[in-house]
Amino acid sequence: MLGRYVARRALVAVVVLLGVTVITFGLMHSTGGDYVPGVNYDNPHLRTETITAIRHEYGLDQPWWVQYGLWLWNVLHLDFGRSMIDGAPVTDHIVQRLPNTLELTVAAILFGVALSIPAGVVSALRRGERLDHSLTTMSVAGFAVPEFWLGLMVILLFGVIPAQRLGVPLLPTSGAYDPLAGGFDPLDRLTHLVLPAVVLGFAYLSVWSRFTRSSMLEVLSQDYVRTARAKGMGERRVVYVHALRNAITPLVTLVGLELPGLVSGGLVVEVVFGWPGIGRFAYERAIAFDYTTVMGITTFAAVLVVAGNLLADVLYAVLDPRVSYS
Amino acid sequence: MIGPSAVTEAGRIDPVQAAESVHAGQSYWSESWRRLRENRVAMFAGAVVLLMAVVAVTAPLLSHFVTHHTFSAQDLDNNFAGPGTPGHWLGTDELGRDTLTRLAYGAQVSLGVAFLTVLLSLTLGTSAGLIAGHFGGPIDEVLMRVVDIILAVPRIFLFILVGILFFHNINVLTLSLVIAGVGWGGTARLVRGEVLSLRTRDFMLASRSIGGTNFRLIRVHLLPNVLPVLIVAASLGVGTIMLAEAAIDYLGFGIHPPTASWGNMLTNAQTYFVHSPWLVFLPGVCIFATVLAANVFGNGVRDAFDPRLK
């Protein structure tokens, strides 16, 4: 039963993946045309026959379905094409920047989890009190603030203004490390990480703290919590052991939903803070109209989303026997 | 990304009070509308959104009669003028363009795209969801796989891609089409889910047994029943779309200058941050305030209209 379910989900994932590649390839084909990345077409010594030969070599004179098959074959081998600007494989660019992007998004998720659980619990325990109201207000405001503008305000507050008043910024506001320092300095990386990770994590904080609050309120009214209290168990133990454990289990699913965004979710923040990750790279190449690179990165990110969803489906079925196999 | 549906309980009505004031014989619509009217916070928020819409519509009048500047008129002798400068109430930008005028025109883009996108994605998503849920089988399978495919491509990359592919043809209408082209998937799933629970109900069977056609079943029985969910989705969607649109403009893949939008007014913000922070501050405050008002109003609408919360 489980085997059939997994097989079905895998089949759906393959179909979705094919659909995604059709979209990206279709967009690329309609614009990129027969341009060969890395060839300087302005070179007067380049003969027409040579161009034709190069296009033939890359299969660009083939009908579109042959080209699509070729491209798909490459994607299956983790080859996401070449840049139109420098001719380098997009995969190399991605691999080079992936650690930076993961550093930022994982830090943001950790920040979100670390703050949202206490905030949600406190809100639930002091329901209707002033503290609860202010946390709720902050969360509603957190939904409405544009991420990039929050980043700009944070840079103003921690970088520009202290630099004017004190002569030095409180925290670095650009890049992932100090290029002049040389070598790997954990403290330097950490200080660079603080502001972008907090800005990116702020959105998670708004959602997850609300979620923890309502989940906690629901759990606190359950029978087993009343039983625990009736047994004479201390309030701290009731709240932090019996209630909290059950309240944050659904949060795990919610956090898991953000995993596909590990690569793409931080794009705007990466741009604002000059973070050398995949998102900012895609943005820079998009401004330079490097179609093939943007297509390659988009395909890569979509593949990760599909793979992540499949993994979540399978894990869910394995872990939770109540999932219906249909 | 994070959807507005997780926003909860801004200005929720007191259930006890609500239960007491239920009048017998009132329809669902007048009852919901009354509940919304009694939610003062939500009504105030709604008024703020309405005010912004009025500003957007009357921007040319404001420009002509109040600020006496057009949104693109440059005044290079007076660039980076601070707020309170005579003739420029909120100052000027790097080309000496009047900030107040540009903010008013920016409302046109923000609200125009938001409302148009909501309309487009709801129309598309509702049609797809009704058809998929009602007919089921292969039609359902195909439509839902299409939704899966669209939702699998990370939005921000897709927006950037379309932004560069159609760089010279981006305006309020095309930008709305692009955002709606991605956004309809969520609505389709939502509506399909509603229809699946409605299709087994007795009134559906009754209508079918007396010869009701598919079209009639969908139009007369399904559509009115999913309408509350749609109203809630629409009012909560406005804020999310405004934020997405502002980010696209900020990155330079949406509405291009000299047309003013709250997002593209911030594009080069970092370069004149040090001497003119208000130029970074003002457009952001406009986005924040409008999105906040839209979300709070949306929450009020959800509390008043969503039958499952009763």
Image (cartoon, coloured by chain):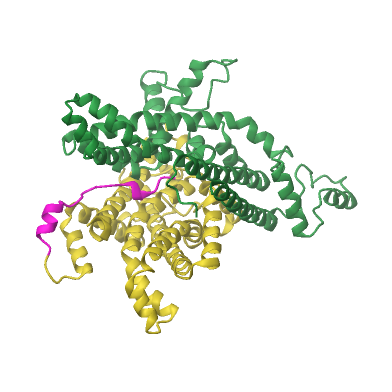
Residue at the image point whose x is 33% and y is 73% from the top: B202
Does residue B121 show up magenta in the picture?
no
Residue A92, quarter of picture: top right
Residue A294, compared with residue B69, is above or below; it is above
**Which residue, as the protein is rendered here, is positioned at the far front?**
A1
Left or right: residue A41 compared with residue B242: right
Residue B122, compared with residue A124, is above or below; it is below
Residue B61, compared with residue A298, is above or below; it is below
Q: Range of the magenta residues? A: B1-22
Left or right: residue A108 compared with residue B303: right
Residue A157, compared with residue B67, is above or below; it is above
Q: Where residue B210 appears, x then y in whole percent?
A: 37, 84
Residue A276, quarter of picture: top right
Front residue of A31/B108: it is: A31
Left or right: residue B149 compared with residue A27: left
Front residue of B189/A50: it is: B189
Left or right: residue B226 compared with residue B305: right
Chain B drawn in what color?
Answer: yellow
Chain A drawn in what color?
Answer: green
Front residue of A308/B264: it is: A308
